[in-house]
Image (cartoon, rainbow, N blue to C red):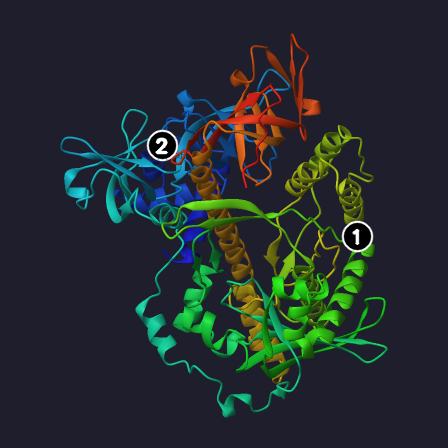
Amino acid sequence: MDEKLLEERKKIILDIIDSPNYVPMKIKELAILLNVPKENREDLAYVLNLLVSEGKIGVSKKGKYGKVSSNLKLGVFSGTKNGYGFVAIEGETEDVFIPASRVNGALHGDTVQIAVHPSSKPDKKSEGEVLRIVARGADTVVGLYKQYKTYGFVLPDNKKLNKDIFIAPENSKSAMDGHKVVVKIIDYGNDDKNPEGKVLEIIGHINDPGTDIMSIVKAYGIPTEYPEDVMDEVEKIPSVVSASETKGRTDLRNVDMVTIDGEDAKDLDDAVSVSFDGTLFHLGVHIADVSNYVKEFAPLDKEALKRGTSVYLVDRVIPMLPHTLSNGICSLNEGVDRLALSCLMDIDLKGNIVDHSILETVINVNRRMSYTGVKKIIIDKDKDTIKEYESLVPMFNLMYELSKLLREKRRKRGAIDFDIPECKIMLDEKGSPVSVAPYERNDAHRIIEDFMLAANETVAEDLFWQEMPFLYRVHENPDPEKMQKLMTFINNFGYDLKGVDEIHPKEIQKLIDKIEGTPEEAIISRVTLRSMKKARYSVDCSGHFGLAAKYYCHFTSPIRRYPDLMIHRIIKENLNGGLSEKRINHYNNMLPEIADSTSLHERRADEAERETEKLKKVEYIIKHLDEELEGVISGVSAFGIYVELPNTVEGFVKITDLDDDMYYFEEENYRLIGRNTHRTLSLGQKVRIVVLAADKLQRTIDFGLVTENEGEKEVE
């Protein structure tokens, strides 16, 4: 059905339903009224379902279509392992609770129409009932195959899908008990009947190395293999830069520059250079010119857009671009010519960028440096390392000086610097975790971070004032309601925030400065971070709250992020004669969709990364069952407390496992209080725990609270 005909039919139905004399009707009655023959009723059902999904009409439990009732809402169902669920409604802050008896066949992720029944108690959530499943959320599921006599069941990894999936013998693909599989749902079932599925792929046995991580990859729909046409295209890409490719580019091969990355990094997409003339610093940020090899609409480009980003998991990297590019011709490897897009900035002694230029260049990196090596030079003053890189040491010292200037400039305007340690998990050759520890940033990390931020802001402002179609990285102001909750939370620790309704990032940064070095620093930092919105990509330059920046974009990582690659194309086209009206319209039409899809892919990658970390932390803590350890209370609820260990592993202490006392939850102060002992358990409080249990399938860790102060240990 073409767009014009669809809109005409939607209007006809809306006019009928909106008329004052209309009485809600079933599809059969509407078909008679509209003279729709039997063979065309599927088209009518499609249009009606579309209007329901758009929230323009409603449908009753008996299947009658009519005006949208004030208590009828459309939203996305989020299930739980206990059968009940919640429905998130766009534009509303509170989810609607759906009791298990009123789920009516909805599964996690489904778009549903619900009837909302407001609670009689003001402090209780509204309850609802699923009337209709408008659209299914997923048609494939990853889970554990269990073999019975003549049939099988798949237990979903996602426990929010609280029903096992029946597998008939002819649909098992010869899966065996203990296999992790990908299943396509062929029948969603109902309240009395389990969903039915067909095995599409056997990932591996649950005990095989790597199967656990690959199960998460498959569950998130992250592609791992490249299509044949992509690999055919890659084979034709040269492995070295030719002389013809360097023509017309600014030659910076005589400029001293380095890459600074982690020891195990292979996709090196940024190099930096710094010099000082006595008045100005000259900072060069040189980014791999990936767009020279990934052409618009080519198979490689389509696949990169489909992926959106590289995914960095505990045991592997799933790259956006094939290794031939990401680790080869596009990687700024030491001692070889590479094509780049360079942002050259002149910076005064106050950290102001007073001039800049963006150029197509050809570069040759002097040395491939690690964060550890640079730290040894600028902080530790290690004599052996200084001698090894003697000719570059003056530049590293300049980098350190300039980095501090840029950071202080950002701090003064109110940029927020959350120094929350990331987690570093080391695995053995079988994929089993041997250590879990915080991964601390050092000053070498900050140098690269400061330089990349400067380039990203400079490029964004440049293109904004040229009024070019563009992809910005935006971070909206936080919701006043969440800021009010944050205010209540930090008041418990004796801290305050000003201007909660229209808060300035400087107030958040002041809070971060105040808590630095305190026992509650990690807890308050995390809660504050969770109180803010997620950054995303947008065609509108609405600013970046966290950085207190008016203009910001992602320019510096085109090997691993599609928005950066898109930005490079626009910049290069603009440098080489400018964008015609036709090309401006072309970008204006396509960029909003790219902004949305890449934002979604970024979130997908983040969630997959978190899931793999959580999985390996559970696997690691299993080795420490019955050990007593010290941790900090990182969360409090009516059901118990979360405790985080120094190595970032977090477990839950059930309220029933605390001690013999009866505890009540004081929500406004985020604490549990014993009714008899008056013992208080609050956020940020140090406690001793014993590791009781850990479940890899559920990805849960259970701690017990230790009241005796003896046998202190820490897991490294």
Residue 392 appears in the picture as rendered: yes
* Residue 591, horizontal then vertical, whole percent: 55, 64
Whether residue 200 is situated above or below residue 130 in the rendered picture? below
Dot 2, how many residues are within 10 Å of its Cα: few (below 14), some (14-19), or many (20+)?
some
Q: Which residue sits at x=41%, y=50%?
A: 428
Q: SS of the residue at dot 1?
A: loop
Residue that numbered label 2 is attached to? 26
* Three-letter code for the amino acid on which mark 2 is drawn: Lys
Task: Between residue 495 and residue 517, name the one nearer to us.
Answer: 517
Q: Which residue sits at x=45%, y=40%?
A: 620
Residue that numbered label 1 is attached to? 414
Q: SS of the residue at dot 2?
A: loop
* Residue 324, horizontal then vertical, whole percent: 41, 73
Whole-angstrom CA distance, mark 2 to mark 1, is 58 Å
Whether residue 438 is situated above or below residue 356 in the rendered picture? above
Quadrant in the picture for residue 286:
bottom right
